């Protein structure tokens, strides 16, 4: 009676668990990516860096614009001489104007360098975005595969427990040996150790998931339709990577910035001209108003010798330009390698999945047959344990291959430059500094701010 009550209770618990799992909403890869996109601090930091780079454009452009200033001042003078006291006060007010009208195109080069730097910073956002989203997918699949491995190894323990009990029962009736019992006990201990290792790995992967997504993983579902973004040939994937990967585009922008830096350094050898002017008035308590006065002047400067600083700056700029071109070649090679590696990873995972599926199907058949033969006395408990171990290995390979397929798919998207919120169609506000860049290039914004 007690056994029947336990059986009913266990069945009820399993039914409730099934209802709970079935009623819980699955957390898809798209949902995890969407949440992570808004949560990721690395992405927010890249956005702030891009906004900071945009300010360099405004700073560079200020070199071509005039500077206007207003001043208001006053003095109070007094003296005591021959027993008499005298004093006076003076008030002054004026407006000043200064502007560089020619600097051998040095400022133009600095503006171009700043714009290229801002463009590179925008591409850095996209590159960081790809790195974050790929890390989320890796964490997502790590949790999912670890959960599957935990369930598999728990099932393995249950099997070994059943085999240990069977071996003991057979020993009690004189059909088995102590060796069978010892072997079953050893496999059970080994299975328990691997189960605990899987639990530890799961805890780590869940912590990693929460770090990227900002929430604990729920009921994960690895199904997705992003495979449609994968081209049909490796050459097409390489072509897309060369034309759209943010790291390559960022390298090209860095080359432009370095070239502009060289132009700016070379421009320092040329002449520069500036104009200045001021207008103002003064009032003295003794002499009264002094009217309005002003002045206008210009300056032409030609550098002759700067202690070697100009030549050094040119040589340094040339070196930086060469370095930017070398870095671009390195980025190109790395992206090409990543595309080929991810492409091969998908092909390998497909082959492993097919082989693992066949091995699992065959392993189940073999295990059932070995158990029957053991019951007939033609096989031993060790044969059963070995068959179970082979089946478990095949099932683990099946889990790992499926995980590798998903990760390789998203790795290829990343290598192609298409692992972005826009390409994936995520329901997020895309982080970009383009609008901010347009705002800071407003010529009269600062003047309006002062007026307000």
Image: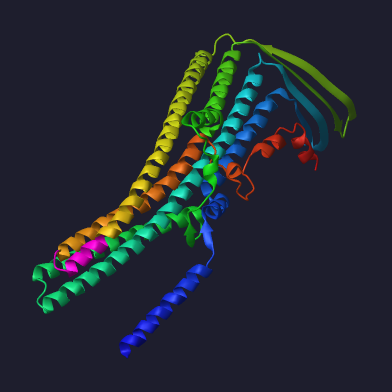
Q: Is residue 266 above or below residue 358?
A: above
- The reply to whether the magenta stretch includes residue 375 is yes
Quarter of the rendering containing residue 165: bottom left
Q: Which residue is situated farthest in the bottom direction here? A: 1
- The reply to whether the magenta stretch includes residue 446 is no
Q: Is residue 222 above or below residue 308?
A: below
Q: Would you say 219 lies left or right of 264 here?
A: left
Quarter of the rendering containing residue 119: top right
Residue 297 image point, x, y percent = 77, 16
The part of the chain drawn in magenta is 367-378
- The residue lying at 45 percent from left, 34 percent from top is 339
Q: Is residue 122 above or below residue 207?
A: above
Residue 92 image point, x, y percent = 82, 32
Q: Is residue 81 above or below residue 222?
A: above
Residue 44 image point, x, y percent = 56, 46
Q: Does the image show residue 313?
A: yes
- The residue lying at 32 percent from left, 91 percent from top is 1
Q: Pick the quarter of the image with the C terminus.
A: top right
Q: Does the image show residue 78?
A: no
Q: Main secondary structure of the magenta part?
A: helix
């Amino acid at each position: 009676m007690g056994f029947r009550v336990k059986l009913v209770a266990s069945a009820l618990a399993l039914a409730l668990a099934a209802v709970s799992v079935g009623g819980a909403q699955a957390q898809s890869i798209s949902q995890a990516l969407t949440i992570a996109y808004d949560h990721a601090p690395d992405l927010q930091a890249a956005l702030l860096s891009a906004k900071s780079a945009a300010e360099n454009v405004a700073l560079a452009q200020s070199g071509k614009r005039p500077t206007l200033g207003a001043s208001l001042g006053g003095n109070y003078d007094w003296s005591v001489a021959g027993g008499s006291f005298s004093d006076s006060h003076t008030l002054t007010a004026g407006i000043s104007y200064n502007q560089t009208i020619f600097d051998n195109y040095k400022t133009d080069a600095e503006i171009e360098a700043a714009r290229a730097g801002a463009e590179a910073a925008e591409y850095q956002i996209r590159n960081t975005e790809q790195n974050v989203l790929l890390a989320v997918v890796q964490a997502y699949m790590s949790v999912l595969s670890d959960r599957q491995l935990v369930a598999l190894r728990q099932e393995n323990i249950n099997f070994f427990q059943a085999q240990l009990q069977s071996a003991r029962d057979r020993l009690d009736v004189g059909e088995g040996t102590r060796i069978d019992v010892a072997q079953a006990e050893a496999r059970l201990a080994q299975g328990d150790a691997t189960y605990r290792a899987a639990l530890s790995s799961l805890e780590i992967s869940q912590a990693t998931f929460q770090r990227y997504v900002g929430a604990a993983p729920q009921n994960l579902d690895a199904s997705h339709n992003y495979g449609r973004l994968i081209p049909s040939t490796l050459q097409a994937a390489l072509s897309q990577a060369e034309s759209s990967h943010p790291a390559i585009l960022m390298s090209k922008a860095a080359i432009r910035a370095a070239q502009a830096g060289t132009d700016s350094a070379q421009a320092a050898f040329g002449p520069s001209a500036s104009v200045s002017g001021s207008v103002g008035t003064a009032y003295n308590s003794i002499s009264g108003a002094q009217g309005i006065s002003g002045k206008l002047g210009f300056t032409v400067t030609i550098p002759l010798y700067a202690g070697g600083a100009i030549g050094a700056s040119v040589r340094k700029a040339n070196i930086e330009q060469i370095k930017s071109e070398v870095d671009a070649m390195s980025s190109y090679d790395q992206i090409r390698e990543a595309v080929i590696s991810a492409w091969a990873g998908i092909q390998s995972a497909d082959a492993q999945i097919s082989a693992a599926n066949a091995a699992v199907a065959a392993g189940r058949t073999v295990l059932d047959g070995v158990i029957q033969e053991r019951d007939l006395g033609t096989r031993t408990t060790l044969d059963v344990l070995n068959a179970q171990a082979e089946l478990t290995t095949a099932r683990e390979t099946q889990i790992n291959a499926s995980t590798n397929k998903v990760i390789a798919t998203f790795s290829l998207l990343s290598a192609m430059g298409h692992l972005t919120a826009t390409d994936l169609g995520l329901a997020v506000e895309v982080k970009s500094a383009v609008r901010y860049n347009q705002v800071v290039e407003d010529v009269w914004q600062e003047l309006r701010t002062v007026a307000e």
